[in-house]
Image (cartoon, helix red, strand yellow):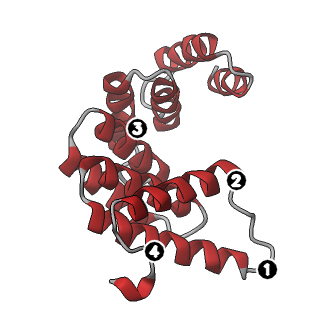
Amino acid sequence: WNNIGMALFGKGKLIAAISSLKKANLLDSIEWIINHNLGILHLHTAQFVTAFHHLQASINLNSKTPFAPSFHYLGIALAHLDDHPNACAAFKKALKLDKKDDAVVARLNYAIALYNEGDFDEAAAQYVALEAQLSALAHTPGADEPETDVLERAAELEGCLHRRGVATTPSSK
């Protein structure tokens, strides 16, 4: 049921996907990945409290081998719930756990959350680190290129920071 739910999610059938994942959760309530997937789906349907619940359950069920994306998505949920300190803690944990490509998206979302909270200097610092990661990826043979929407959101963030008069170059720190 978990795989069916994620296949439905991939086809954009969110309600059917949630229904399948809830059935999977009923059948195996201690499987962390089911809660992780439910958290992602609830983020996509803007049900942030429910997303928080499932992502927190996923993290607690998988405490021996923490999964960075669970912390990343938890940070997004908490940012939408206006819990800035805990959102920042979740993003920092995600970045600490994942030093690979996935950290690019986590860092971008962290920078956006900081910007939305009004912490422009730290948002700029995270943006500079994001640009360094993107540059390193561009020079890594065989590395996947970031998705277009990630690059577009990064450019939007840079524009917003510039309009606020916040420098986004490494030498500006």
Residue marked by disc 3: 58
Alpha-carbon span between mark 2 and mark 4: 18 Å
- Secondary-structure class at tag 3: helix
> In screen coordinates, is 120 left or right of 16?
left
Mark 1, residue position? 141
Local secondary structure at mark 2: loop
Up the image or down, 70 lies above or below 81; here it is below
* Image position, residue 51 (x, y; %): 39, 28
Mark with earlier residue (3, 2): 3
Front: mark 3 or 2 = 2
Above or below 153: residue 164: below
Q: Earlier in the sequence, mark 1 or mark 4?
A: 4
Q: Would you place residue 27 above or below residue 158 in this image?
A: above
Q: CA distance from mark 1 to mark 3?
A: 34 Å
The answer to which quarter of the image holds residue 121 is bottom left
Label 2 is placed on what type of residue? Glu
Q: Amino acid at mark 4?
A: Ala
* Foreground label between 1 and 4: 4
Q: Is residue 51 left or right of residue 89?
A: right
**Do the residues under discs 3 and 4 have CB atoms within 8 angstroms?**
no
Q: Nearer the viewer, residue 64 or 83?
A: 83
Q: Residue at x 31, y 41 (%)?
A: 79
Measured as percent of width and height from the top left, residue 133 is found at 56, 74
Q: Which mark is residue 129?
A: 4
Give 117 or 29, whichever is nearer the viewer: 117
Q: Nearer the viewer, mark 1 or mark 3?
A: 1
- Residue ID at (34%, 67%): 165
